[in-house]
Amino acid sequence: MKKYKCKVCGYVYDPEKGEPRRDTPPGTPFEDLPDLWKCPSCGAPKRMFKPLD
């Protein structure tokens, strides 16, 4: 599973960890996050994330 980085603030979503601040359980791929999911650090929309190599 790929990690994704917010282009606004640099927050990295790690699917192995999930995101407790957004009630996202570990093991959730970025692609499976709801379309309205937002960056827990700055509130940027999901479309503002890019995959990390």
Image: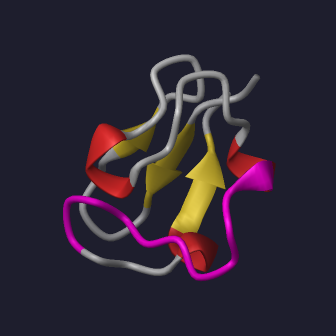
What colouring does the structure picture have?
A: secondary structure
Q: Is residue 30 left or right of residue 37?
A: right
Q: What residue appears at the point 39 percent right and 40 percent down from the top-left corner?
A: 19
Who is closer to the viewer here, 26 or 38? 26
The image shows residue 5 at horizontal and vertical percentages of 47, 47
Q: Is residue 2 left or right of residue 3?
A: right
Q: What residue appears at the point 45 percent right and 21 percent down from the top-left corner?
A: 17
**28 versus 36 height, above or below:** above
Q: Is residue 39 left or right of residue 32?
A: left
Majority secondary structure of magenta residues:
loop
Q: What residue appears at the point 62 percent right and 55 percent down from the top-left corner?
A: 50
Who is closer to the viewer here, 22 or 9? 22
Quarter of the picture holding the C terminus: top right
Q: What residue appears at the point 43 percent right and 72 percent down from the top-left corner?
A: 38
The image shows residue 47 at horizontal and vertical percentages of 62, 76
Q: Hey, which quadrant is residue 4 in on the image? A: top right
Count of residue discs: 0
The image shows residue 9 at horizontal and vertical percentages of 24, 62
The image shows residue 36 at horizontal and vertical percentages of 58, 82
Quarter of the picture holding the N terminus: top right
Who is closer to the viewer here, 34 or 45? 34
Where does the magenta region start and end? Answer: 32-42
**3 versus 4 height, above or below:** above
Q: Is residue 35 located in the magenta-colored stretch of the structure?
A: yes
Q: Is residue 1 located in the magenta-colored stretch of the structure?
A: no
